[in-house]
Amino acid sequence: MAAVEMAHTGPAGAAAAPSSENAPVARTSPPRTTHDYLAEVRAGYTPENRAYWTTNVVLDLVGIAYGIAVSLIFLFGRISARIRDFAHGHARGRYRRVLIYFAIYSALSFLIAFPLSWYQGFALEHRYHLSTESFGRWLGDELKELGLAIGFLGVAPILVLAYFVMERVRRWWVVLAVASIPLVVTFVLIEPVVIDPLFNKFTPLKDQALKQQILALAAKAGIPGRNVYQVDKSVQTKKYNAYVNGFGASQRIVLWDTTLKGMKPDEILFVMGHEMGHYRLGHIWKEIVFLSVLGFAVFYLSGALMTWAVRRFGPRWGFAELHDIASIPLFLLALNVVGLVTQPLVCAQSRGQEHQADTFGLEVTHLNDAAARAFVKLGSQNKSNPEPPRLLEWFEYTHPPLLERVRYALEYRPWEQGKPNQAFHPKP
């Protein structure tokens, strides 16, 4: 789909006006209406885009079923019990045993899931001309993620703590829910400066003219504008994106270099206004609080599910206690199942924050048409469904559907009606 051009309201053609009264009248391009934009969005959702989106949804559902099946195979096939026996026979101490167990379990799970991961993460993206990544680089990133999961920054140390608490504390789920809070905060703090640079190169924004515009917008928004970065995502994908992560000294606003190349300056400024909205509205901290509160329910329900399952099937699986490390597949399975049940809440909270950030971006920039064009480009380039079924929106969409965002971008103009802002309130 072609990029949506800005509406022109002045005369088209030469700068000098004809002197003859019989000269043709210069034509102007009528402003694009909401109907025009929505029609373009629907037309841009081509059969190819629909096929890509549908395939991804199906693969997501297959992935959930696949993960559940693999965990059950580890349990009912007593594979988990055999790995535990191997770990106990080759190491002393809880940490070493868990590390050996989880390394073997993760490696086997990685190999079992590899065909699905390869197809969805690599082959499908190349088939629809969205990926620029070589197989070697893609595989390297996958192995890095596996290494992080096994290593010190990943899951193994957390499992050591979890199983220690399971053995010593009756209401272990309360302790794990509380302990997860500093872990989440630590991860959010170190992600931009430790983890993300393992996968891509981050540099301060190079376009100095655009940088000055963004700094001026940041000053207007009342936030520090020094931490604006660009990342070389073009070595992996053709998709567009921008985001804000971290907090305090590690907080940064990041633009993909694909976004810088594919969008116009006013479109990028709205995108920046949106990301500044996340910053000013404290969305990262609010999300941490939300997930921490939700964590109590997740750990409680997971514990109840695990307790029932061990009583019912423990002898067949080769263990009789929750704190036996052979129950790790059951622990991860329970967390995933409960997480799936609570997924609509997580998505709804995220969609609410994204809508607030859209509002902030519009109020701080007044670039309604640029916002609509930015959304059209994002939807077209990323091949997203602009009108997903409501059930899929609840379970899959962390952002409002594209059609809703375009309509809102064009119609939300409280400043023209003398009404107060909802999100952006200038600091005195």
Image: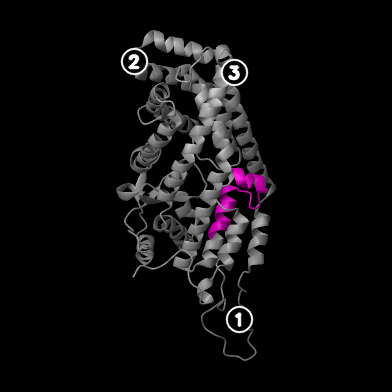
For the view shown, which residue lies furthest in the front direction?
170
With 42 as the anchor, is 357 left or right in this view? left
Task: Tell me the SS state at disc 1.
Answer: loop
The amino acid pointed to by label 1 is Ala
Q: Which residues are magenta?
A: 374-395
| 3 vs 2, front mark | 3
- Badge 3 is on which residue? 312
Task: Tell me the SS state at disc 2.
Answer: loop
With 171 as the anchor, is 70 left or right in this view? right
Residue 114 seen by the camera: no
Relative to 130, say whether 33 is above or below: below
Residue 128's x, y, as percent?
Answer: 60, 41
Q: Earlier in the sequence, mark 2 or mark 1?
A: 1
For the N terminus, the image quarter is: bottom right
Tell which of 154 and 423 is nearer to you: 423
| 2 vs 1, front mark | 2
How crowded is the residue under tag 3: few (<14 C-alpha within 10 Å), some, or many (20+)?
A: few
Tell which of 82 and 167 is nearer to you: 167
Relative to 385, say whether 79 is above or below: above
Question: Which residue: 53% across, 12% down?
Answer: 318
Residue 116's x, y, as percent?
Answer: 58, 29
How crowded is the residue under tag 1: few (<14 C-alpha within 10 Å), some, or many (20+)?
A: few
Q: Is residue 115 magenta?
A: no
- Badge 1 is on which residue? 26
Residue 283's x, y, as percent?
Answer: 43, 52
